[in-house]
Amino acid sequence: MHRDAPDDAAWIDRFEWRARLRTKPPLNAAYRIGIGFLGLVVVAVGAAAVPLPGPGWLIVFAGLGIWGTEFAWARDLLHFARRKVHGWNQWLAPKPWWVKALVGLVVCAFVLGAMWAMFAISGVPGLLPDSIENLLRKLPGVS
């Protein structure tokens, strides 16, 4: 496991205000709970946005970054994810254009499939323009 410092407390206490806060257990606990909740909200929003077009994974990683300011397991998970993304980029970079295009098509198919499944399960949201709602409702299994 990767650690930013040999001692987790030393990493957390790298800022003077955080070191002072850590000396007050009730305030420290409240702060950690707040960071945990904020990270949870950001990760949940990101996870909900993953199958949609947009920055879903980026939002998930931002939530992990928020958690990582307080929790070693989140820092470790974020470093693991960064290594995997970097490894994926290193693998894909030298490939010919047609392999990159095929990967892009697979990703698009996955996103479209996830969106179809979401609409099939929960229905088409009413906040979309009527023309798009009508078009989506014509898809098989979507109501």
Image (tube, grey):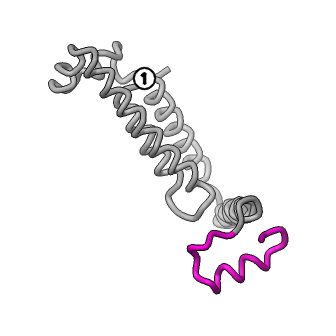
Majority SS type along the magenta span: loop
Q: Position of residue 124 (x, y in %)?
A: 68, 70
In the figure, 6 relative to 114: above or below? above
In the figure, is residue 99 to the left or right of 65?
Answer: right
Q: Secondary structure at mark 1?
A: helix
In the figure, is residue 137 to the left or right of 65?
Answer: right
In the figure, 100 relative to 71: above or below? below
Task: Identify the residue at image location x=56%, y=56%.
Answer: 49
Q: Which is nearer the eye, 129 or 56?
A: 129
In the figure, is residue 66 to the left or right of 124?
Answer: left
Is residue 106 in sight in this rendering? no
Task: Identify the residue at image location x=46%, y=50%.
Answer: 59
Q: Position of residue 102 (x, y in %)?
A: 71, 64
For label 1, the residue is 72
Q: Position of residue 14 (x, y in %)?
A: 22, 24
Is residue 70 in sight in this rendering? yes
Magenta stretch holds residue 137: yes
Residue furthest right as drawn:
140
Q: Which residues are magenta?
A: 124-143
Q: How many marks?
A: 1
In the figure, 50 relative to 17: above or below? below
Q: Position of residue 48 (x, y in %)?
A: 58, 52
Residue kind at label 1, given as amino acid type: Ala
Magenta stretch holds residue 121: no
The quadrant holding residue 118 is: bottom right
The quadrant holding residue 18 is: top left
Q: Quadrant of the C terminus?
A: bottom right
Task: Identify the residue at image location x=52%, y=63%.
Answer: 54
Task: Identify the residue at image location x=21%, y=14%.
Answer: 23
The quadrant holding residue 71 is: top left
Q: Which is nearer the eye, 27 or 8?
A: 27
**For the residue carrying disc 1, how many other residues have a C-alpha within 10 Å: few (<14), some (14-19), or many (20+)?**
many
